[in-house]
Image (cartoon, rainbow, N blue to C red):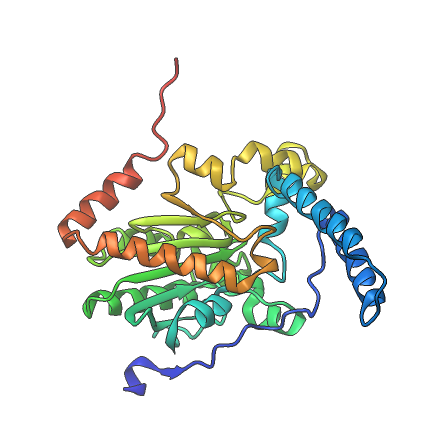
């Protein structure tokens, strides 16, 4: 079996996570209040200082500030959350949402790509195939994972696993989290554009249910290469865009400092994408974002995946293919008044 599938059971663990989540700039007022609250609790620990009322006031203030900030996030702030290194990555979700993940390696043409872990797993006891993008949290991991930017062999490996899933009647779950496909010379020499194009064509024809979830960054063709699905979902603080805000700013304003303006113009957040009909659903996150609560985010993601798989199970392969074609064919159609 190893000769044909080149597999092993992966030991899934959350990759390195800092002991304390570093706050983003707009989160610093919340972090300061939480530090103040912790200092007050430490001072009162084991003594009768009667600080309960003061603790209650600070907790109330923190709650109000969190609601004010997180319910009014700008597009650029959501991009920052989507890129936070403490945010759960694909392997984190594989450990928290799935069981018995067995990673399959290699594209049978060139080699393996560690930036795209793919394989077989179970979700709530149900067998599925999983294709993912994986980033790193420190220099060593980012070198291994190529910062989440896949080479051609990654997309070809993903397609191999998806074809295997179709052969054995397994649904496919894609966890998308990449700034984009790798644009280096080696990737161009091995035909990165062709490998993505083939995936777009072949995923449109796979006779099995496909659910894709943008869990962090959904960058350009790199995300589309595993993003053709019957249900395309996006997590509340993820983004999905044809180009990064910095890339757009460099083209339109000739400087990346205009990235916040570009993020607004690109309409890349979950509410905008729902309005434009580019995604089918938004997976909510715990207050403050998934980077503050891995377990809570994983529970919400698992629920969304299972609900969509249950819905797709009721459709025949012919119905899946027809609906999938119509869904993507309708994108980009608009009329001017």
Picture coordinates of residue 90, whole percent (x, y):
48, 65
The residue lying at 25 percent from left, 67 percent from top is 165
Q: Is residue 29 above or below residue 293?
A: above
Of 98 and 59, the residue lying toward us: 59
The residue lying at 55 percent from left, 59 percent from top is 184
Q: Is residue 204 above or below residue 101?
A: above
Picture coordinates of residue 166, whole percent (x, y):
22, 65
Q: Is residue 245 above or below residue 194?
A: above
The residue lying at 30 percent from left, 68 percent from top is 128
**Residue 145 visible from this viewpoint:** yes
Quarter location, residue 154: bottom left
Of 238 and 260, the residue lying toward us: 238
The residue lying at 40 percent from left, 49 percent from top is 233
Of 325 and 183, the residue lying toward us: 325
Q: Is residue 269 above or below residue 211?
A: above
Picture coordinates of residue 121, whole percent (x, y):
34, 73
Q: Quadrant of the N terminus?
A: bottom left
Residue sitting farthest toward the top: 337
Picture coordinates of residue 313, whole percent (x, y):
20, 56
């Amino acid at each position: 079996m190893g000769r044909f599938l080149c597999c092993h059971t992966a030991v899934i663990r959350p990759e390195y996570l800092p002991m304390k989540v570093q706050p983003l700039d707009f989160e610093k007022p919340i972090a300061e209040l939480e530090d103040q609250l912790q200092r007050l609790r430490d001072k009162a620990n084991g003594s009768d200082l009667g600080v309960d009322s003061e603790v209650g006031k600070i907790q109330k203030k923190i709650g109000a500030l969190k609601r004010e900030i997180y319910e009014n996030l700008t597009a650029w702030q959501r991009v920052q959350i989507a890129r936070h290194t403490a945010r759960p990555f694909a392997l984190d979700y594989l450990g928290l949402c799935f069981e018995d993940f067995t990673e399959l390696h290699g594209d049978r043409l060139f080699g393996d790509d560690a930036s795209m872990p793919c394989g077989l797993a179970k979700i709530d006891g149900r067998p599925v195939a999983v294709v993912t993008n994986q980033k790193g949290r420190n220099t060593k991991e980012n070198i291994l994972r190529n910062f989440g930017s896949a080479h051609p062999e990654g997309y070809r490996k993903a397609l191999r696993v998806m074809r295997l899933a179709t052969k054995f009647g397994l649904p496919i779950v894609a966890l998308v989290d990449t700034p984009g496909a790798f644009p280096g010379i080696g990737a161009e020499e091995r035909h990165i554009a062709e490998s993505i194009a083939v995936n777009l064509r072949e995923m449109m024809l796979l006779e099995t249910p496909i659910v894709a979830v943008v869990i962090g960054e959904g960058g350009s063709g790199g995300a589309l290469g595993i993003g053709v699905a019957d249900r395309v979902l996006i997590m509340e603080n993820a983004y999905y865009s044809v180009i990064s805000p910095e890339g757009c700013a460099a083209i339109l304003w000739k400087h990346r400092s205009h990235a916040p303006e570009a993020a607004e113009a690109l309409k890349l957040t979950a509410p905008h994408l729902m309005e434009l009909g580019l995604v089918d659903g938004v997976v909510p996150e715990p207050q403050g974002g998934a980077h503050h609560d891995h377990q809570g985010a994983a529970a919400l993601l698992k629920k969304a995946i299972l609900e969509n798989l249950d819905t797709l199970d009721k459709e025949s392969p012919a119905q899946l293919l027809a609906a999938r074609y119509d869904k993507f064919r309708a994108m980009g159609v608009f009329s001017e008044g």
